[in-house]
Amino acid sequence: MSKVLFILKRREDFNATVHNHVGLSTGLYNSASFVNQMLLDSGIESALEVATDNNCIDRLVTKHKPTHVIIEALWVVPTKFYILQKLHPKVTWIVRLHSEMPFMAGEGMAMDWLGDYSGFKNIVIGVNAPRMLRETRLYLQHRNQWSNEETERRVIYLPNYYPQDYKSPRKIDKKKDTVDISCFGAIRPLKNHLLQAFGAMEFAEKIGKKLRFHVNAGRIEMQGGPAQANLKGFFEQIYDHGHEMINHQWTPREQFLELCAQMDIGMQVSFSETFNIVGADLISQGVPLVGTAGEIPWAVTPFCADPTNSADIADKLQKTYNSSWINVKTNQWSLTSYTNKTNRVWHKYFS
C-alpha cells in the first residue's frame, strides 16, 4: 500500500495574522489538503507538510517515510533531486502542476525545469487538467524520446478534489437597491477582472441596481499591477453613478466561506483555469456562479460566459439572477460528478 506525503512551499509573504497556522491561505494549500483528506477517507495513508524552502524536504521525508512524495507546483530546483534521490532512493517523486499552458507561460523557468525533472528516472509529473496533460506528454516525449507507454507512466493525470459539503441555494434579495457581485482571487492578467467589472456594471444598470463589486486585495501576481490599477481607476471614474469596488483582505478559509455566502452572484470568467477552487467555494455556499466554459471543468455551460465579451457576461449575469436556484443546483451536481471521478483516479493510482 502507498504512503503519500504532500509537500508545499510556504508563501513568501506569510503573515501570521492573515494566513493559517501552516503558513498558507491559498488555493494551492486548499487543493492539497482536500486531496490529502480524500485519501485518508479512502484508507490510504497520507500526510501534508509545508516547507519553507528546498532544504526542508529531506527532514520531512525522513519524518514520514512515504512511498510517494507529491511536490505541489514548481518550486523545487531540479538539481536538488540529485541529493534527494540519493538520500531516499525508494521514493517516487511526483511534481504536480496546477496550471494550463497559457498560465504556465508566465513562469519563466517552467519548461526548463520540467525538462530537467524528466531526466530523473523516479520523478513523475502529475497534471490536474486534461489539455495540460496532453501538452506535457507531447513535450516530454519529444524531449526524452520516450515510448507511449513510458510517457503515460511518467506523466500522469491527478485532478483536483473538492469536499461535497454544500449549502442550499441562497435566495437573492431583489428588493435592495444594490447587487453584490464577487470576483475573488489573486489579481492576474488571465483572471480577467476588468472585463468582468464592465459586464457586472452593465448588468447592474439593466436591473436598476447599484453595483458592489467585491475583490480580494493584497495579492498581485504575475504582472498583475496594471490590471489592479485599471480596475481601481474604472471604479473611481464611475463612482458618481453609485457603483463601487469593495476590497477584502485575504482571510483563513472559514472566514472566506462566510464572505462568499454574503454574495448575490460570484464571477470567475477567467481566460485560463484548471479547476477554480474559488468558484467551488461560492457554489458550496449556495451562491450562483458565472464562469468560463471549457476552463472550469465542472461549471455548467448555460451559465458560462465568453471571457472576451462583456455583453455576454452581462447576459449570463442576468440569466443567473433570474434562475439562481437552477444555477446553484446544476453546478453542485456537476461538481459532485467531477469529484467522484477524481476520487476514483487517485484511488486507482495509489492503491
Image: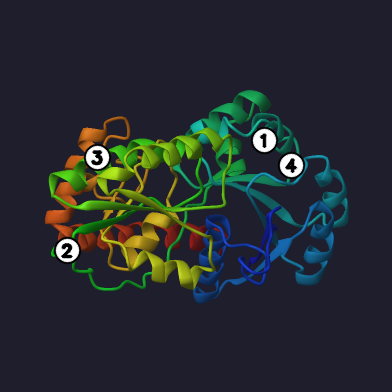
- The answer to which of 163 and 185 lies nearer the viewer is 185
Q: CA distance from mark 2 to mark 4?
A: 50 Å
Q: Looking at the image, which residue is at 13% across and 57% down?
A: 323
Q: Looking at the image, which residue is at 81% across and 46% down?
A: 81
Q: Looking at the image, which residue is at 32% across and 35% down?
A: 307
Crowdedness of circle 4 by 10 Å Cα count: few (<14), some, many (20+)? few
**Which is more N-terminal, label 4 or label 2?**
4
Q: CA distance from mark 3 to mark 4?
A: 47 Å
Contact between marks 2 and 4 (CB within 8 A): the answer is: no
Q: Secondary structure at mark 2?
A: helix
User: What's the residue type where badge 2 is placed?
Assistant: Trp
Residue position marked by numbered label 4 in the rendering: 121
**Which is more N-terminal, label 2 or label 1?**
1
Q: Secondary structure at mark 3?
A: helix
Residue position marked by numbered label 1 in the rendering: 114
Q: Secondary structure at mark 4?
A: loop
In the picture, the quarter occupied by the N terminus is bottom right
Q: Secondary structure at mark 1?
A: helix
Residue position marked by numbered label 3 in the rendering: 313
**Which is more N-terminal, label 4 or label 1?**
1
> Could you tell me residue 142's position as x and y percent?
61, 23
Crowdedness of circle 3 by 10 Å Cα count: few (<14), some, many (20+)? many
